[in-house]
Amino acid sequence: MAMADRAAQFAPFSALSGYDDAIVETARRTDSRPLPGEDELAAMDAEFARILPRLGERPKIALSYFVPDPKKEGGQIVGRVAALVKVDAAKRLLVFSDGLTVAMSDVLSLRLEE
């Protein structure tokens, strides 16, 4: 048998293709969706009432929100500061100057940056 043919029979073989990717995906951590309490919801409502009249000024908002994971249960809590451009009440969305849209139901906290 030629040396090249002989070497081919000892080449690595993966009987379980995709197994390594599945292990990595399973090990990837996600956070569960936190549920704000009544006091936190009341504080967000009060802060939102302060923000709405200033919407034309594109106020900067410090925001934390939940991003659901597309592949498995849970998600990630993200924080950022961005200029609020529009509130779409019909779709219940906050639209920011950088193109980000956040569903109001995903907002965990918001604060007007003065």
Image (cartoon, rainbow, N blue to C red):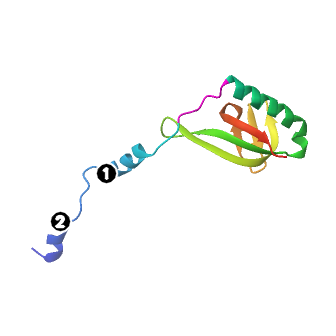
Q: Which comes sooner in the sequence, label 1 or label 2?
A: 2
Residue carrying label 2: 10
Q: Position of residue 35 (x, y in %)?
A: 61, 28
> For the point 37% across and 46% down, which residue is it?
22
Distance, label 1 to label 2, CA atoms, is: 18 Å
Q: Is residue 98 above or below residue 77?
A: below
Which type of secondary structure does the marked residue at label 1 adopt? loop
Queried whether the magenta region covers residue 35, the answer comes back as yes
Looking at this view, name the residue that lies furthest to the bottom.
3
In the rendering, at what x and y percent does residue 81 appear?
A: 74, 48
| Above-or-below relation of 72 to 37 | below
Question: Front-most of 105 and 34?
Answer: 34
What residue is at 82 percent from the left and 40 percent from the top? 86
Q: Is residue 75 visible?
A: yes
Q: Residue at x 31, y 51 (%)?
A: 17
Q: Is residue 109 left or right of residue 46?
A: left
Magenta stretch, overall SS: loop
The range drawn in magenta is: 32-37
Q: Horizontally, is 21 left or right of 77 in the view?
A: left
Asked if one can make out residue 90 in the rendered structure from this viewpoint, the answer is no
Q: Amino acid at mark 1?
A: Ser
Residue that label 1 marks = 17
Q: Is residue 24 left or right of residue 11?
A: right
Percent coordinates x, y for residue 84 in the rendering: 80, 44
Query: Considering the numbered disc 2 on the image, is that residue within a helix, a strand or a loop?
Result: loop
